[in-house]
Image (cartoon, helix red, strand yellow):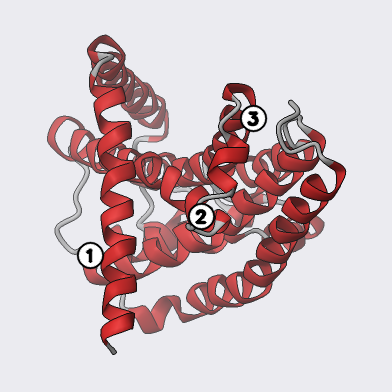
């Protein structure tokens, strides 16, 4: 029991150390931070005025989400950003360490490589969470989106499952970068398909049958489906149980596969002596 508590304490300390390091780095670029705030406001405003074209028009495909396009796309914009950071941050951590020549030193530390990758990306997920909250706040304060009936507790559960499922895609992408020293084209494909078929900008129901079949395999489809029903309509967890089950199944399958792929990638580069190559 004591040993387990010590392990948990060590993990928490390491996470905060990584967060502090990245926060100090990010805080040194104040103009970039301000630019992100402006960009969020401009992007949200752009979709608000785009949504006004549909004012007064009944769109059947939007009826399951309350019938209003702007809240629909606002949730899609906000939570789809986790996919980009999950796929990009893990691979970027590996690539940056390769270029800086610190990868070999990182991998010989007592901390397991998988923990190093996850801890290095913790700040990216935290920053993304703040941006998501900012998008929702801007939509509420400036553009009149109502979240008064939102099931926030259910949304937090779905968010946790979303981050986990997306992260496994990122770990797999990091394994590819570790071996091939280049960006992972399969990550671009998954991200592109997610934005095309996952219901970020339009309901999945408008897609042809074959595309809906592909969309059903993508975790972002189920994440956004659940988020919209929980935040916009205030539905219960039982109402989005299918989406939750899909995220759990995806994580259960992709999790072990991605961790095995990353472990095999490390073993291969160590055997080939290409750990420091980039």
Q: CA distance from mark 3 to mark 2?
A: 50 Å
Placement of the C terminus among the 4 image quadrants: top right
Front residue (pair 181, 52): 181
How crowded pointer 3 is (Cα within 10 Å; few <14, some 14-19, many 20+) is rated as some
Q: Which mark is residue 152?
A: 1
Tell me the quarter of the picture where residue 212 sits.
bottom right
Instruction: Point out the residue furthest to the bottom here.
Output: 1
Mark 2 = which residue? 60
Q: CA distance from mark 1 to mark 3?
A: 40 Å
- Residue 220 coordinates in the image, percent (x, y): 56, 55
Mark 3 = which residue? 98
Is disc 2 placed on a helix, strand or loop? helix
Residue 53 placement, left or right of 258: left
- Residue 9 coordinates in the image, percent (x, y): 26, 67
Placement of the N terminus among the 4 image quadrants: bottom left
Kindly indicate whether the residue at mark 2 contacts the one at mark 1 (C-beta within 8 angstroms). Answer: no
Residue 117 placement, left or right of 185: left
Identity of the residue drawn at 59% across and 43% down: 87
- Residue 178 coordinates in the image, percent (x, y): 72, 41
Can residue 234 be seen in this snapshot?
no
Identity of the residue drawn at 80% across and 36% down: 274
Is disc 3 placed on a helix, strand or loop? helix
């Amino acid at each position: 029991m004591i040993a387990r508590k010590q392990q948990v304490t060590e993990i928490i300390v390491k996470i905060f150390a990584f967060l502090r390091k990245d926060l100090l780095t990010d805080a040194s670029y104040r103009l970039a931070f301000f630019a992100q705030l402006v960009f969020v406001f401009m992007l949200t405003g752009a979709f608000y005025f785009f949504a006004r074209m549909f004012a007064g028009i009944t769109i059947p495909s939007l009826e399951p989400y309350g019938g209003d396009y702007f809240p629909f796309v606002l949730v899609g914009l906000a939570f789809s950003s986790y996919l980009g950071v999950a796929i990009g941050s893990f691979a970027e951590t590996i690539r940056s360490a390769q270029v800086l020549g610190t990868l070999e030193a990182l991998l010989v530390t007592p901390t397991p490589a998988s923990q190093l990758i996850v801890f290095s990306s913790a700040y990216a997920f935290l920053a993304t969470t703040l941006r998501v909250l900012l998008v929702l706040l801007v939509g509420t304060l400036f553009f009149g989106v109502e979240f008064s009936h939102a099931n926030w507790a259910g949304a937090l559960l779905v968010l946790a499952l979303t981050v986990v499922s997306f992260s496994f895609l990122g770990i797999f992408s990091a394994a590819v970068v570790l071996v091939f020293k280049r960006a992972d084209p399969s990550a671009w494909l998954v991200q592109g398909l997610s934005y095309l078929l996952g219901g970020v900008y339009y309901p999945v129901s408008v897609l042809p049958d074959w595309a809906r079949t592909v969309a059903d395999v993508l975790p972002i489809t189920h994440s956004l489906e659940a988020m919209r029903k929980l935040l916009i309509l205030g539905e219960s967890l039982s109402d989005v149980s299918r989406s939750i089950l899909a995220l759990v199944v995806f994580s259960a399958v992709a999790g072990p596969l991605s961790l095995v792929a990353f472990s095999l990638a490390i073993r291969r580069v160590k055997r080939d002596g290409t750990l420091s190559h980039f």
